[in-house]
Amino acid sequence: SGHTATAFAMSYTLAEFYPPARAIVWSLAAGVAVNRVVTVRHFASDCVVGAWFGIVMAALLLRSRWVDSMAESILCRLHRVRFTLSID
């Protein structure tokens, strides 16, 4: 399930950056998966595979150098914008 994969990828990412919110974000992701099964949109196996896929992809991306360089680029741009706004 694409919805489940997205929910678990976001949960993994948020749990990495905001550890106190882990219980909440994982519960919400599980709720998405259960909802997909209960509303007969997917089989349970689809949601299990979607959850696994989302977690694996998020873990791989968070540990890649590409994400580090992208985050650094975004932070530099935000710093420039804030600096520009403070001068004006």
Image: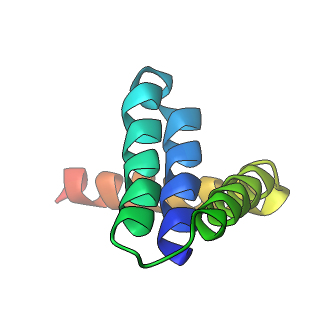
Q: Quadrant of residue 57?
A: bottom right
Q: Is residue 76 above or below residue 23?
A: below
Left or right, 70 with respect to 22, comes to right
Identify the residue at the far left of this view: 88
Say which residue appears at 71% left-offset and 56% top-offset: 52
Percent position of residue 87, x then y: 23, 54
Say which residue appears at 56% left-offset and 71% top-offset: 43
Name the residue nearer the viewer: 42 or 49: 42
Name the residue nearer the viewer: 7 or 13: 7
Q: Is residue 81 above or below residue 14?
A: below
Say which residue appears at 83% left-offset and 56% top-offset: 65
Colour scheme employed for the rendering of this structure? rainbow
Q: Which image quarter is the C terminus in?
A: bottom left
Percent position of residue 28, x then y: 37, 45
Left or right, 63 with respect to 58, comes to right
Percent position of residue 68, x then y: 72, 52
Q: Which image quarter is the N terminus in?
A: bottom right
Q: Is residue 61 above or below residue 42?
A: above
How many marks can you see?
Answer: 0
Percent position of residue 44, x then y: 58, 63
Name the residue nearer the viewer: 5 or 39: 39
Left or right, 49 with respect to 63, comes to left
Name the residue nearer the viewer: 86 or 62: 62
Say which residue appears at 37% left-offset and 49% top-offset: 31
Q: Is residue 15 above or below residue 49?
A: above
